[in-house]
Image: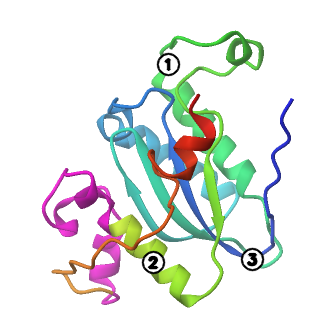
Amino acid sequence: MSSYSRRRIPGATYFFTVNLASRGGSDLTDRIDLLRSAYRKTVVEHPVFCDAMVILPDHLHAVWTLPAQDAGFPERWRKIKARFSHAIGEERRRSSSKLAKRELGVWQRRYWEHLIRDDADYRAHVAYCWGNPVKHGYVARAVDWPFSSIHRDIRAGRVEAEWSGSMPEGDFGEWGGWFARRWVA
């Protein structure tokens, strides 16, 4: 059995990539209201500052800063995923291990997490969230994607409405990068 070690540092900022079990689906955007509800309920119980987030049809990216004495991001993701899965209320094709653990088969079991190291790393990961819908070809401009925190940041004056920052180079937990080579058989 594999052992997964996550760096859990109270008050730290992290980047996440969280995927549906079935790539190519569109549950996250088709049922955005259920995902928003799951997120809202979870952060009421376990606050977090969402620095950036983008929801795509079959995966999401987020940059979160945890409260000063809190390193519990796994519990937050567990609750968001469980609440969304239960709200969908559909059974999915599941492996015997998912059946044994009473997982509904909506989400990929694991997720990518990266501890933000410095200001440049932070800026690159926030830009990655904003630019991801463009990267995947959903829209021509980041501002045209409705499920992105870029809209909040434009309203707050943190980014120009016509931001077209280039996608940073690196491994951001996307399929085709290290994550895919590591987790896909």
Residue 78: quadrant of the picture: top right
Left or right position of 7 against 27? right
Left or right position of 42 against 92? right
Left or right position of 88 against 42? left
Residue shown at 40% from the left, 68% from the top: 128
Residue 139: quadrant of the picture: bottom left
| Residue 124, disc | 2
Residue 8: percent from left, percent from top:
81, 64
Which residue bears the numbered disc 3?
Answer: 11
- Quarter in which the N terminus is drawn: top right
Q: Residues within 10 Å of mark 1 (few under 14, many from 20)?
A: few
Looking at the image, is 98 positioned above or below residue 46? above
Q: Nearer the viewer, residue 34 or 161?
A: 161
Looking at the image, is 54 positioned above or below residue 2? below
| Residue 139, disc | none
Q: CA distance from mark 2 to mark 3?
A: 20 Å
Q: Nearer the viewer, mark 2 or mark 1?
A: 2
Q: Residue furthest left?
A: 140
Residue 20: percent from left, percent from top:
48, 34
Looking at the image, is 68 positioned above or below residue 158? above
Upstream in sequence: badge 2 or badge 3? 3
Secondary structure at badge 2 equals helix
Residue 9: percent from left, percent from top:
81, 71
Q: What type is the residue that disc 2 sits on?
A: Ala
What span is colored magenta in the figure? 131-158
Residue shown at 74% from the left, 49% from the top: 75
Secondary structure at badge 1 equals loop
Which residue bears the numbered disc 1?
Answer: 89
Q: Nearer the viewer, residue 93 or 182?
A: 182
Q: CA distance from mark 2 to mark 1?
A: 36 Å
Upstream in sequence: badge 1 or badge 3? 3
